[in-house]
């Protein structure tokens, strides 16, 4: 039994070997998080306690796992396995639980959108978003005003 035209068109291409995708995603996630002002402020101010730097690294690892965990598990290739709302909730929950910080500047949504676009691009073998982040000013942060609670 072959796939119908609609299913085939909706199936993401995996032209790039997974061995190349995972390191690229890890690097991209780190680049995005390093430019997220709310996270960087929380780390620099130690709002997560003495483990603030480790917590930031833990977030990067959790995000990489989240993007990687459901690969190949859907029986219907056209069903999206990653939803931006879930990613936004994950980021928000992490900031509240790890840094006691509510981020209300819209940056959670911006970071989630960047990560989703980057993930889709990497799956297609397009590393342009990551390369652009590497070339950009590392001090150009997403968002500006987290609120400590």
Image: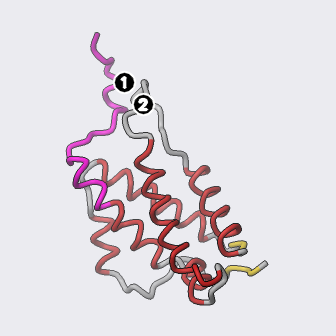
Residue located 37% across and 32% down the image: 10
Does the residue at mark 1 contact the one at mark 2 (Cβ under 8 Å)? yes
Q: Which mark is residue 6?
A: 1
Q: Which mark is residue 120?
A: none
Q: Position of residue 21 (x, y in %)?
A: 28, 54
Horizontal relation, residue 86 to residue 59: left or right: right
The residues tagged by marks 1 and 2 sit, at their Cα atoms, a distance apart of 9 Å
- Taking the spot 48% from the left edge, 51% from the top edge, the residue there is 66
Q: Position of residue 27 (x, y in %)?
A: 33, 68
Q: How is the image coloured?
A: secondary structure
Q: Is residue 44 above or below residue 85?
A: below
Does residue 39 lie above or below 20 as drawn? below
Q: Residues within 10 Å of mark 2 (few under 14, many from 20)?
A: some
State the image quarter where residue 6 is shown. Answer: top left
Give 11 or 99, whichever is nearer the viewer.
99
Q: Is residue 106 left or right of residue 149?
A: left
Magenta stretch encompasses residue 78: no
Residue 78 disc label: 2
Q: Is residue 118 above or below residue 67?
A: below
Q: How many marks?
A: 2
In this view of the protein, which residue sits in the foreground, 114 or 42? Answer: 42
Which region shows up in magenta?
1-24
Secondary element under disc 1, as helix, strand or loop, is helix
Residue 115 screen position, x and y as percent:
45, 60
Q: Residue at x 43, y 25 (%)?
A: 76
Q: Where, quadrant-wise, is the C terminus in this rendering?
A: bottom right
Q: Determine the secondary structure under disc 2.
A: loop
Q: Residues within 10 Å of mark 1 (few under 14, many from 20)?
A: few
Q: Residue at x 46, y 66 (%)?
A: 60
Q: Position of residue 114 (x, y in %)?
A: 46, 63
| Camera-nearest label, 1 or 2 | 2
Residue at the farthest top position: 1
């Amino acid at each position: 039994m072959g796939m119908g035209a609609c299913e085939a068109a909706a199936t993401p291409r995996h032209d790039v070997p997974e061995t190349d995708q995972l390191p690229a995603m890890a690097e991209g996630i780190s680049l995005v998080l390093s430019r997220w002002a709310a996270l960087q402020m929380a780390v620099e101010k130690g709002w997560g306690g003495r483990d603030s730097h480790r917590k930031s690294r833990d977030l990067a690892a959790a995000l990489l796992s989240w993007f990687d965990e459901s690969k190949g598990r859907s029986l219907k290739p056209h069903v999206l396995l990653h939803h931006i709302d879930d990613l936004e909730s994950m980021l928000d929950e992490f900031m509240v639980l790890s840094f006691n910080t509510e981020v209300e500047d819209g940056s959670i949504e911006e970071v989630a959108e960047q990560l989703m676009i980057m993930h889709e691009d990497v799956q297609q073998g397009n590393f342009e978003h990551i390369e652009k982040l590497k070339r950009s000013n590392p001090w150009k942060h997403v968002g500006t005003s987290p609120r400590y609670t």
